[in-house]
Every structure is written in C-alpha cells, then in structure tokens.
C-alpha cells in the first residue's frame, strides 16, 4: 500500500456526516480539505 505525502495547509475544521448504504451513519470532526482514511 502506498500512502500519499501529507499536504501541509491551514486546516478548516468541520463536522462531517457520512451515511453508508447499510444504514450506518458516522460523524467525524475533520478538515474540509483532507481526505478521510478508513481501514478495518
């Protein structure tokens, strides 16, 4: 697995909502410009 280099920038924090097709909902406090990293 290749992990991309982390971009350095001023973060804009917000509460995001992620709704999965199986009905599970997740809330995360994250930067608007950064991608989420999910793993098992």
Image: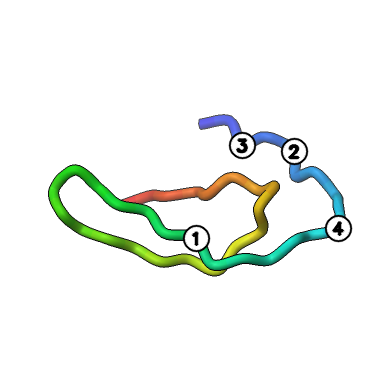
Is label 1 in contact with label 3 (beta carbons under 8 Å)?
Answer: no
**SS class, disc 3:** loop
Would you call the spot at circle 4 few (<14 residues within 10 Å), some (14-19), or many (20 or more)?
few
- Which mark, residue 25? none
Q: Which residue occupies the foreground of this view, 40 or 30?
A: 30
Would you call the spot at circle 2 few (<14 residues within 10 Å), some (14-19), or many (20 or more)?
few
Report the side of 21 relative to 6 (left or right): left
Report the side of 21 relative to 29 (left or right): left
Q: Of callouts 3 and 4, which one flags the residue occurring earlier in the amino acid sequence?
A: 3
Residue bearing mark 3: 3
| Residue 32 at x, y percent in the picture | 66, 53
Q: Of callouts 4 and 2, which one flags the residue occurring earlier in the amino acid sequence?
A: 2
Report the side of 26 relative to 38 (left or right): left
| Residue 33 at x, y percent in the picture | 70, 47
- Which mark, residue 5? 2
Q: At x 60% / y 62%, what residue is drawn?
A: 30
CA distance separating discs 1 and 2: 23 Å
Is label 2 in contact with label 3 (beta carbons under 8 Å)?
Answer: no
Number of numbered discs: 4
**SS class, disc 2:** loop
Q: Which of marks 1 and 4 is in front?
A: 1
Q: Of callouts 1 and 4, which one flags the residue occurring earlier in the amino acid sequence?
A: 4
CA distance separating discs 1 and 3: 23 Å
- Which mark, residue 10? 4
CA distance separating discs 4 and 2: 16 Å
Is label 3 in contact with label 4 (beta carbons under 8 Å)?
Answer: no
CA distance separating discs 2 and 3: 7 Å
Q: At x 75% / y 45%, what residue is drawn?
A: 6
CA distance separating discs 3 and 4: 21 Å
Q: Nearer the viewer, mark 4 or mark 2?
A: 4
| Residue 15 at x, y percent in the picture | 54, 67
Residue bearing mark 1: 16
């Amino acid at each position: 697995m290749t992990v991309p280099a982390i971009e350095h920038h001023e973060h804009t924090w917000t509460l995001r909502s992620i709704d999965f097709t199986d009905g599970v909902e997740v809330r995360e406090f994250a930067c608007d410009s950064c991608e989420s990293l999910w793993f098992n």
